[in-house]
Image (tube, grey):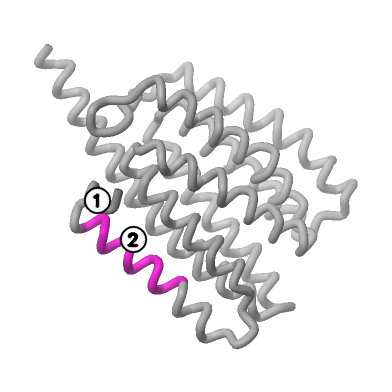
């Protein structure tokens, strides 16, 4: 599978894995599960940027592992979001993508105003409902956890619609998660590894947007020539 990556993509993947592993090695009491989870997550982003089905499989695995880590730290918003929202959406996206495959990956869909409207309404309704659930469970960092839900819904749904803007939504979510785990690392230094993890995720999501935008331009060119 690695042979399908370009040199730039392979370099980005290797660099990302290296930074994550090294950041964990410098923390004496690092949980190995955190390292493995982070590596799976960043690998998922590389393949999603390629519009490859493997990306969604890895995303599903990451959601389960990350959800467990979040639950153990009372970040119930993250737990609910990734286990009951982002995880299932990754499975649904896997099915949708499998039915829209091109020879070199998955065809991108040019985002319409209708798509943005549906996604926006879904994000607002989900955020409103989830806020009160998070309050009930006395979720840590309630404001950040709520914002994380909003950005996650945007990202997950835009990915199902095969829109390049999924990457922008995930990049925004990465910033929120950097703040969340930055606060957690004050209490337990081992969680600083997740701060590095989401910094790397942010960089990879920006690449994902670039990759999908490039594919979209190629699609527009093909349609105009047809």
Report if residue 161 lies within the magenta region: no
- Side of 119 where 16 appears, left or right: left
Tags 2 and 1 touching, CB below 8 Å = yes
> Residue 143: x, y in percent?
73, 53
- Side of 133 where 145 appears, left or right: left
The furthest residue to the left: 225
Q: What residue appears at the point 63 percent right and 56 percent down from the top-left corner? A: 66
> Residue 88: x, y in percent?
62, 34
**Could you tell me what secondary structure mostly forms the magenta stretch?**
helix
Q: Which residue is mark 2?
A: 13
- Tell me, for residue 5, which label it has, or none: 1
The furthest residue to the right: 136
Give the magenta-colored segment's residue range. 8-20
The foreground one among 96 and 182 is 96
Q: What residue appears at the point 23 percent right and 28 percent down from the top-left corner? A: 103
- Side of 64 where 102 appears, left or right: left
Residue 26 versus residue 49 in the image, above or below: below
Residue 95 versus residue 133 in the image, above or below: above
> Residue 50: x, y in percent?
31, 42
- Location of residue 99 (image quadrant): top left
Q: What residue appears at the point 41 percent right and 29 percent down from the top-left corner? A: 162
């Amino acid at each position: 599978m690695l042979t399908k990556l370009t040199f730039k993509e392979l370099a980005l993947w290797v660099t990302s894995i290296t930074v994550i592993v090294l950041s964990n090695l410098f923390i004496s009491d690092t949980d190995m599960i955190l390292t493995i989870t982070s590596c799976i997550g960043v690998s998922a982003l590389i393949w999603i940027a390629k519009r490859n089905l493997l990306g969604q499989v890895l995303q599903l695995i990451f959601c389960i592992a990350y959800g467990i880590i979040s639950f153990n730290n009372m970040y119930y918003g993250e737990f609910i979001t990734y286990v009951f929202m982002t995880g299932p959406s990754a499975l649904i996206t896997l099915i949708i993508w499998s039915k829209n495959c091109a020879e070199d990956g998955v065809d991108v869909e040019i985002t319409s105003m209708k798509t943005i409207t549906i996604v926006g309404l879904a994000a607002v309704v989900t955020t409103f409902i989830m806020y009160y659930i998070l309050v009930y469970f006395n979720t840590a960092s309630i404001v950040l956890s709520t914002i994380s839900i909003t950005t996650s819904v945007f990202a997950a749904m835009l990915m199902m619609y095969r829109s390049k803007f999924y990457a922008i939504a995930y990049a925004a979510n990465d910033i929120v998660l950097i703040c969340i785990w930055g606060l957690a690392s004050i209490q337990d230094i081992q969680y600083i590894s997740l701060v590095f993890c989401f910094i790397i995720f942010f960089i990879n999501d920006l690449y994902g947007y670039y990759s999908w935008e490039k594919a979209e331009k190629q699609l527009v060119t093909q349609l105009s020539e047809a």
